[in-house]
Amino acid sequence: MRESSVVVRPEAKDSGWYSAASRLQAAGLHEAITLFEQAAEVVPIPRSPRPIVIVDYGAGTGHNSVLPICAAISVLRKRTRPEHSVLVTHTDVPENDFTALFRTLSEDPDSYLKRDPASFGSAVGRSYYSQILPSNSVNLAWSSWALHWLSRVPMPVGDHLLAAYSGDAAVRTAYAKQAAHDWHEFVAFRGRELSPGGRLVVMAMGVDGDGELGFQPLVTALVDTLADLVAAGVLTDEERQAMSIPIVGRSAKDFESPFAPSGTFEKLSIARMELFEAEDRFWKQYRSDGKARVLGAQWAAFTRSALFPTLSWALDPNREQPVSVFFDELQKGIAARIEADPVQIRIPLAQLVIEKRAD
Ligand SMILES: C[S@@+](CC[C@H](N)C(=O)[O-])C[C@H]1O[C@@H](n2cnc3c(N)ncnc32)[C@H](O)[C@@H]1O
């Protein structure tokens, strides 16, 4: 996985923090799921025996997909007979851990497979930057926490890890160009796959009112710890220079760009769009228990699973120390920094509903 699902995963079930509600809230998905349910109320559905097709783009482990999909199926069931089949297709890149995905589908108590006997799970291991499903076949589509990852690293960031925080205008331009291209391609291919009247709900990283990506204190802790690790000899300067994290936050204008100027593109239009800030649930916990050490540990664990794998692409394959030593030291450093200076993390997100014209 290119990004963790820790921010998007609930606390362990025995932590006292777990509940279906916290799971959604943690993911910033609460509103998006409502949009998905509203879409399920109105999308045209095929006549039985043709299945209703729901697609999950960038599914990862499927952990955060099962609730929205279950919710959509419940809404659809008010419009169909219980035996009308629903085919759910989870898509991701070929390297994704599809074993984990299928385990979620069969074991998670919130899985639609456990809730709806006429639902069927399937998966496609291909990037969504191409057409990966038949034209006009998808009735409802979902994508969460995926579209901020660029399809490629346009160039090394050099002075930072994230282009958004680079002082180099050429870096920022290259990443913005790639982000525009990727969003254009994603939308264009969904335009083919969605059936007439079909709807797609997207939740991805946005920017805040100042056009900032957010996560700044966390990213600063990461960058500063990397500098310490270079000084301590855990990381070479070359390895550090080669590191970059190819994620972008998009503004409303960025999301609208493929649809400009007419508002329509490949028969698609934006039915709704909101940029908002998700709750920092680790901060909320800290405000109630005052445990800075826990706050540091939670954000460091999130960063490890969200971003360390991407950083590891830059490591010298012949390095003597195991990668786990680098990961452990980096995690420790981030945790200590956040513990020493606890702050709330801003998490700007965007959610959109995209609709295909009914023929
Ligand atoms: C953080 S995970 C999100 C998983 C899940 N949707 C969620 O909300 O927790 C991001 C996922 O997007 C996938 N992804 C990134 N680029 C992709 C692409 N070009 N095509 C398909 N999936 C992609 C990653 O492999 C990863 O599984």
Image (cartoon, rainbow, N blue to C red):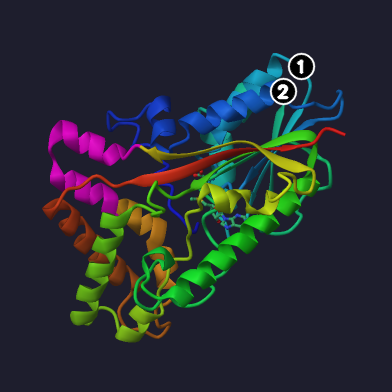
Give the residue type that dot 2 points to. Answer: Val
- From the top left corner, tell me how far across and down residue 64 is, in percent: 50, 38
Identified at 80% across, 48% down, the residue is 192
- From the top left corner, tell me how far across and down residue 330 is, in percent: 26, 66
CA gap, disc 2 to disc 1?
12 Å
User: Which secondary structure, mark 2?
Assistant: helix
Query: In the figure, is residue 264 to the left or right of 7?
Result: right
- From the top left corner, tell me how far across and down residue 28 is, in percent: 43, 37
Give the residue type that dot 1 points to. Answer: Thr
Q: Can you see residue 125?
A: no
Q: Quadrant of residue 96?
A: bottom right
Q: Which residue is labeled 2 in the image?
A: 42
Bin the neighbour count of mark 1 within 10 Å (Cα to Cα): few under 14, some 14-19, many 20 and up: some
Q: Which residue is labeled 1 in the image?
A: 80
Bounds of the magenta segment = 279-300
Q: Is residue 70 magenta?
A: no
Q: Is residue 283 magenta?
A: yes
Q: Which of the two discs, 2 and 1, labels the residue nearer the N terminus?
A: 2
**284 or 50: nearer the eye?**
284
Q: Quadrant of residue 294?
A: top left
